Amino acid sequence: MKVLVVGGGGREHTLVWKISQSPRVRQVFCAPGNAGIARLATCVPIGAEDLEGLLDFARREAIDLTVVGPEAPLVAGIVDMFTAAGLRIFGPTRAAARLEGSKVWAKQVMSRYGVPTARFAVFDAPEAAKAHIREVGAPIVVKADGLAAGKGAIVCGDVESALRAVDTIMVEKAFGASGDRVVVEECLTGEEVSVLVFTDGRDFVPMVSSQDHKPVYDGDRGPNTGGMGAYAPAPVYTPEVHEAVMRDIVAPVLRGLAAEGHPYRGVLYAGLMVTGEGPKVLEFNCRFGDPEAQPVLMLLESDLVPVLEAVVEGRLREAEVRWKEGAAVCVVMASGGYPGSYRKGFPIEGLEEVPPDVVVFHAGTAFRDGRVVTAGGRVLGVTAYGPDIRTAIDRAYAAVERIRFKGMHYRRDIGWRALARLEGRQQT
Ligand code: AMP
Ligand code: GLY
């Protein structure tokens, strides 16, 4: 079969890598892809948000299965569009993708089904939001309702910064119309974990748990990024936590959406805080995480393609989903200045020196004059497997040390919470 992957980051390189290993697949296309993806797939210059262009291409090439990486095309309704055209596509419909597309809607769904999450209030005018913030005090979290490229949640340690966050989102419209409404919510404390499930709208199969590292610097300092690294599985996600997440979060949400006439098909990503009162939802995403997909899919032993097909065809129950023992770690190498402004076009050296048991997933890269150059904020996701997390971390960093590009930076402590937990050290 012919498969089209939509997107061009590290997550999409991982999807292409895994999909291209399937004996069921004859050819893989990626729109728009990147320099790493181009070694495994035919890249086509169509943007991930050009829905018409993607549909035209899929029709013309008679694509058998389209797999969507990023959230924007899902929230814009690419699945509805392809399905109406008789094309098979993996991901939730526009209505179901509102779980990520509207934080207000996601909160209301959680309220309807008694799903544990931070206490919240919704506002469509800045003055009312500010009055509420003054009344309840800090710490507090202010979130733009709509998509904001992962930057729409502002955690505020004091009332002043929360009031400023309201202005940034609702008055200055830093995220455009996504800031027409805000969710103001309780600040939760604990350890975060990402839990992804495959679901066909009725049944669901959990993936191994994972943990992202959002702040740019070691020790979780500095501004948030799209994610500076991830590992799987996450020791904080104990069997007890898993049971609570499946029973109190995943099952009721999927059952509720199906009952409301919007069955959710695809990957449901629950971003959770494991608090003293158990796991609570921070957010839902309607897709694989980036960089969580890198370690998670490295641990998937089964062929991914039959799983994706089973989801699309509503027969997930029949699919085989087996995971490897051991752990995987992804270290992100970023451009100098990221997550602020950065320059592109620097040659990347040392890629050929990376040992064969480590996979360098490309995020922001391009070809120029026959060389691989930087082309984004997050450039590479160096990903290694190990029989245990310590070995996986060591292998990933040994490979990272082989790679060089001007201005590069990366965190040196990816996986520290897992190590601390396993070694019984105090968490900070
Ligand atoms: P979100 O986009 O909603 O996942 O938020 C991005 C990040 O902000 C999360 O990964 C958390 O680190 C943080 N965050 C979001 N909501 C809360 C909350 N209610 N309490 C504490 N931290 C939060
Ligand atoms: N790594 C966070 C996300 O994919 O949203």
Image (spheres, grey):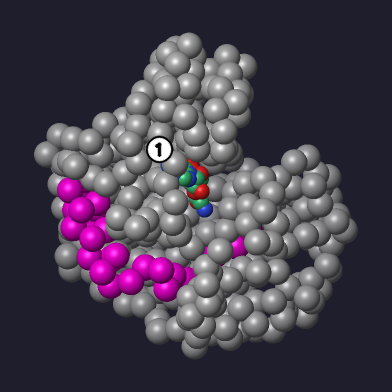
Quarter of the figure with the C terminus: bottom right
Looking at the image, the residue that sits furthest to the left is 259
The image quadrant of residue 324 is: bottom left
The residue range painted magenta reads 227-254
Q: Is residue 308 above or below residue 427?
A: above
Q: Nearer the viewer, residue 58 or 423?
A: 423
CB of residue at label 1: within 8 Å of ligand 1?
yes
Q: Position of residue 37 (x, y in %)?
A: 61, 60
Q: Residue at x 37, y 68 (%)?
A: 237
Q: Is residue 128 above or below residue 224?
A: above
Q: Residue at x 53, y 59 (%)?
A: 212
- Camera sees residue 61: no
Q: Residue at x 77, y 60 (%)?
A: 409
The image quadrant of residue 380 is: bottom right
Q: Position of residue 211 (x, y in %)?
A: 49, 63
How dense is the environment of label 1, judged by Cα within 10 Å: few (below 14), some, or many (20 and up)?
A: some
- Camera sees residue 390: yes
